[in-house]
Image (cartoon, rainbow, N blue to C red):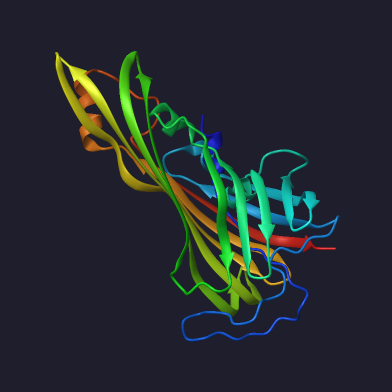
Amino acid sequence: MYKHFFLFVTIVNLLGCDEAYESDLSETGNTTTPISDFFPGGSNAYWLYDVASSSSQVSEMNFTAIDSIYIASATGASFSLGANDNGIARGNMNMLLTNGTISKTNTMLTFDGTIDVPENLADLGFTQELSIEDMMLLNLNALNGEEMFLSESDFSETIDIQGVSVPVDVSSKISTNKINFHDNITLNGTDYNAIFEGEFTLNIAITGTFTVAGSVQTIPILQAQDVMKTSYYFADNIGLVRAETVQGFSLSSQLTTLLSLLNITLDFPASLSIDNVEELSDFSVE
């Protein structure tokens, strides 16, 4: 039921350039010279990650695992990633990155693909696949705090909640931001140089129209909230070295009150929070 909570979307920082790295940060955090390669990878390239997931509400989400990520295919400046011998990544960031195609230039890295929706949100009406085109994961010319990508979408449909047909309106917003560029930083107990720090956010809002005793009521099911937020770090000539994801949701009090009046019991928590951390443990980019 919760398998799709691993995914999400999102994201990665990479770059391609054969020039040597020059550290030239302005006060705004800009880089004036293209940096090396934030997602290098030869035919035998791989990255191993220690994954730790925790949730106080869902015991199934308390686990540790190892993700093996590798180059699955490459064409020119674009490539796709595979995980765990054609399996599914257990880390949120790598689940996102293996669900599409990554393209890189000397200064940017973009992602084309899809984001799977958590099954619990699908039960609440969010059943359409979220497609993404040209989502910028890394932009060396962006300012600290600058929004690199924004995509908004809306749709309507009718869902079934314990035998009750409910028309719903769904809104989603996907965004990425540059947080910082670090000359050096310690992550996972390791000192790294030239680190791009970014953030991916998936925000969702759902409203439903219920008929109670002949009276029509439109109430929020899920008020606009971040159901996934990932902080990610890419290192020059290495790739993704760390990702920290918080995902979850909180149903509106109006919905829980109405369902109680209708004697409808949902088969998942009214609120949920899951932490997922991916730490690079070993790699080879040859």
Q: How many marks?
A: 0
Instruction: Measuring from the top left, give residue 104's x and y in whole percent.
Output: 68, 61
Q: Is residue 87 above or below residue 284?
A: above
Q: Is residue 130 above or below residue 266?
A: below
Pick whichever, 245 or 153, lies toward us: 153
Q: Is residue 272 left or right of residue 243?
A: left
Given residues 37 and 212, the one toward you in this image is: 37
In percent of width and height, residue 38 lies at 68, 67
- Looking at the picture, how far across and down is residue 58, in whole percent? 46, 38
Splitting the image into 4 quarters, where does residue 220 fall?
top left
What residue lies at 74% left-to-right and 43% top-to-bottom? 84
Quadrant in which residue 47 is drawn: bottom right
x, y (%) of residue 61?
Answer: 52, 41
User: Can you see residue 259?
Assistant: no
Q: Is residue 78 left or right of residue 183?
A: right
The residue that appears at 56% across and 42% down in the rendered structure is 6
Tell which of 229 and 191 is nearer to you.
229
From this viewpoint, is residue 155 visible? Answer: yes
Q: Nearer the viewer, residue 107 or 205?
A: 107
Specify the quadrant that holds the C terminus.
bottom right
